Image (tube, rainbow, N blue to C red):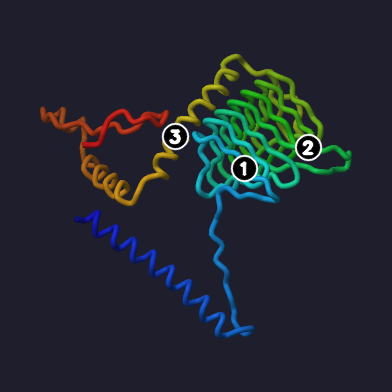
Amino acid sequence: MVVTLGKVVSAMGYWIREAGQALDLLGSRLQGRYAFQEHLSRHQTILSLLGKAPVVAQDAFIAPSAAVIGDVQVGGGSSIWYGCILRGDVNSIIVGSNTNIQDNTLVHVAKTNISGNVFPTTIGNRVTIGHGSVLHGCTVDDESFVGMGAILLDGVHIEKNAMVAAGALVKQNARIPSGEVWAGNPAKFLRKLTPEEITFFTNSAEKYTGLANLHSLENAKTYGEIEEDKKIRKKWALQSDDYDSHLGIVREKAPIRFTFDGKITSKVP
């Protein structure tokens, strides 16, 4: 009954908002040139531009607040997180498979620059791009790692299993060899990577693919499913295994709905 009532209220809210926009448009037309109009721009996650539409793999995750524009390809299992912008307007952007581009990252391209070269942006497979980074007309090879807030300028090439430290500024046409960490402004060689760190790059990408699956499932839920989840969380919120064990009480265990890779492991009772 609660879910049904919630659906009715949600539907009523939607139609009231739509009616309000229609009345505002009608009023503006009646006022003519004296009208003040505030245009509502509905966000588009995937946007065609100049006849070119993004090509996104079916199992890729594009967060609702991200923007993927124009000549962009996103491979299978990859994730474009909240607030990211991939703008393939004057050149192309290619993102490989199982790569994660984290929140508020900007990826753009170069049609012309001082050197006269043309630079698309190419990001390989199993790459991690940290939060708030800027990638402009560069190449990032497979299984490499770009730290949070790093900036990669035109012509930069990050080789496989290389790392750009957080906050680094990599100058135009720089090449970071495999197995090295570069840091600073401008970025310079810092040290060699350990085998454990290189392994971590691949593991990080795999875990982000699983996390993206979970976010994709959550974003796809209907109103009814969201309300059902609220009831389930409330049911198990006060359960304490330590307290029950102390008193010798055996209770039904809370269901584990998802593993880190986003797969459903048990059904909700």
Q: Nearer the viewer, mark 2 or mark 1?
A: 1
Q: Could you say whether the residue bearing mark 3 is in a helix, strand or loop? A: helix
The CA distance from mark 3 to mark 2 is 32 Å
The CA distance from mark 2 to mark 1 is 18 Å
- Residue placed farthest to the front in the image? 51
Q: Are marks 1 and 3 in contact (CB under 8 Å)?
A: no
The kind of residue on which mark 3 rests is Asn
Quick check: 111 left or right of 159?
Answer: right
The answer to which of 199 and 75 lies nearer the viewer is: 75
* Label 3: how many Cα within 10 Å (few below 14, some 14–19, many 20+): many
The answer to which of 128 and 90 lies nearer the viewer is: 90
Asked which quadrant contains residue 99, the reply is top right
Q: Are marks 2 and 1 in contact (CB under 8 Å)?
A: no
* Label 2: how many Cα within 10 Å (few below 14, some 14–19, many 20+): many
Figure check: 39 above or below 71: below
Residue 225 lies, in percent from the top left, at 31, 46
The kind of residue on which mark 2 rests is Phe
Quick check: 252 left or right of 67?
Answer: left
Q: Earlier in the sequence, mark 3 or mark 2?
A: 2
Q: Earlier in the sequence, mark 2 or mark 1?
A: 1
Q: Residue at x 65, y 18 (%)?
A: 193
The CA distance from mark 1 to mark 3 is 20 Å
Q: Could you say whether the residue bearing mark 1 is in a helix, strand or loop? A: loop
**Residue topped by disc 2:** 119
**Residue topped by disc 1:** 54
